[in-house]
Amino acid sequence: MNGRSEARLARPRHVLHIRGTPIATVLLGSMLPALLPIVAQAPLLPPFGFMIFIAWRLLRADIWPLWIGLPLGLFDDIMSGQPIGSAVLLWTIVLLGFEVESQRHFWRDYRHDWLSASVAIAFVLFGGWLFVWASGHGGPAIQILPQIAIGIGLFPFVVRICAVLDRWRLP
Amino acid sequence: MAPPSKRRAGHDRKAQYGLFVSYVFAIGVALVGILLLIISIADPQGFAVLRTAGAETTRPVAAGLKRLILGIGNADEAIGAYINAGSQNSALRRQVDANRTKLIEAEAIRQENLRLKRLLRLTEVDSDVVGAAHLISSTSSSAERVARIDIGTSRGVLPGMPVRAPEGLVGRVLRAGPNTADVLMIIDDGNVVPVRRTSDNVPGISRGHGDGTVEIRALNAERNPFKPGDIVVTSGIGGLYRPNIPVAVVARLDGDKAIAIPLANPSRIELVAVQRPYQPEPDSKPTTGTGVPAPPTSTSVAP
């Protein structure tokens, strides 16, 4: 065995490194709209926090406990400006949906994952719009269609980033 | 590939219980989500502390990036302007010629206005500005149209204060933290502004359309009195927004309402001014209560 693979294989990792990386990336994705200096006139940015969240779920089926929608969703709501509770509810529903779906379809491939992620992104954006509309803000539902398209189009890119981080994270 | 899953209990009774408990937990979380939603829809200010904490933590990065990258929002306009440069140039030249005479006329009217006001001993308190601020970020992934500014209660900004840019009205303060404040923009569905048409004082209300435009409805006309090109300004009726702040220019008509484009494009403006809420003098207002707007008072002078 040469030195390089020895250095890479079975290197001790801190538990925060292994467990914390996915959580940190989701939090960072949720914070992105509040960090970027864009004053948008219509919903523009895809829900990066949610996309990273489901990318990890599809890469590693048992990475998230089913209650994780509460802390991560709450943080996303605080940062994104949605009514508080919106992401808590929607993310948990998506997590449960993936759970049921993965029991029915055991064999998965890349396109299958992308399709289920697309459905999830559309569901979460529409649900988010519905709750904003119920609270008396927002506008016509048609304005979230570009956002859904951007989200679905960027999803493979997000999966790549998560896959690279996954290799970095695990020993 | 078929990923191995620990959420397959098989015949292990203990694992089955564990799985059941995790599902119960998930449904509990969903119920908590519904509860939070109901609270936040019923009482929008209820979670203001949480949101403010989030805003304060992201403020340094957002403000720093804003200073670095100015004008990320108008890249498309720059490209469009480059393509249309030739025709735009001649059109603008004609417009400049037309505007020059109007400018001279306006200057004359302004001086006359000043003289008349001095005659009537009216004191102008128009610059009732709390502070100047930068727009640093917005809810760009949500359907709510809320922008964030980089000053807060430490500089005297309070919820309800109107926010304007040199070009026109931006919105009003929704929440204020120590060093940040969230501004509900006029393009949000929940923001209603009383307006009037500049040319003949037809009163109306402006309401956000959610997609960067506002819709204007006339208050007391049986048919739509607006036509493309009309400019509407705040009327000052009902207080809050002081009169004569430019709001929008009508782009097209849509049934009994007019679709207008805000004059202050929030993705392009840098500096905004937070103003004190406007309170019309109680004696100059007629006895309202019927909802019929008062005609514009002496602050506006028709040419």
Image (cartoon, helix red, strand yellow):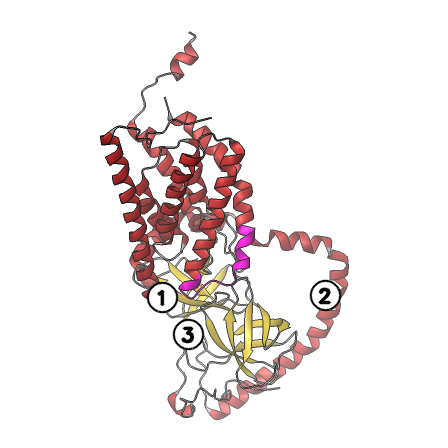
Is residue B139 among what the camera can see? no
Of the numbered discs 1 and 2, the one sitting upstream in the chain is 2
SS at mark 2 in the image: helix
The local crowd at label 2, few if under 14, some if 14 to 19, many if 20 or more residues have their Cα within 10 Å, is few
Quarter occupied by residue B88: bottom right
Q: Quadrant of the C terminus of chain A?
A: top left
Quarter occupied by residue B112: bottom right
Q: Position of residue B10 (x, y in %)?
A: 31, 29
- Total of numbered circles in the picture? 3
Q: Which residue is mark 1?
A: B157
Q: Which residue is mark 2?
A: B92
Image: magenta residue range: A133-147
Numbered disc in front, either 1 or 3: 1
Q: What's the CA distance linking mark 1 and mark 3? A: 12 Å
Question: Could you tell me which chain the residue with mark 1 belongs to?
Answer: B
Is residue B159 among what the camera can see? yes
Q: Are discs 1 and 2 less than 8 Å apart at CB? A: no
Residue drawn at 72 percent across, 70 percent down: B95
Q: Position of residue B55 (x, y in %)?
A: 36, 53
Of the numbered discs 2 and 3, the one sitting upstream in the chain is 2
Q: What's the CA distance linking mark 1 and mark 2? A: 39 Å
Numbered disc in front, either 2 or 3: 2
Q: Which residue is mark 3?
A: B128
Q: Is residue A142 magenta?
A: yes
Three-letter amino acid code at the position of disc 3: Asp
Three-letter amino acid code at the position of disc 1: Val
Three-letter amino acid code at the position of disc 2: Leu
Q: Is residue B108 left or right of residue B279?
A: right
Residue drawn at 55 percent across, 46 percent down: A150
The local crowd at label 3, few if under 14, some if 14 to 19, many if 20 or more residues have their Cα within 10 Å, is some
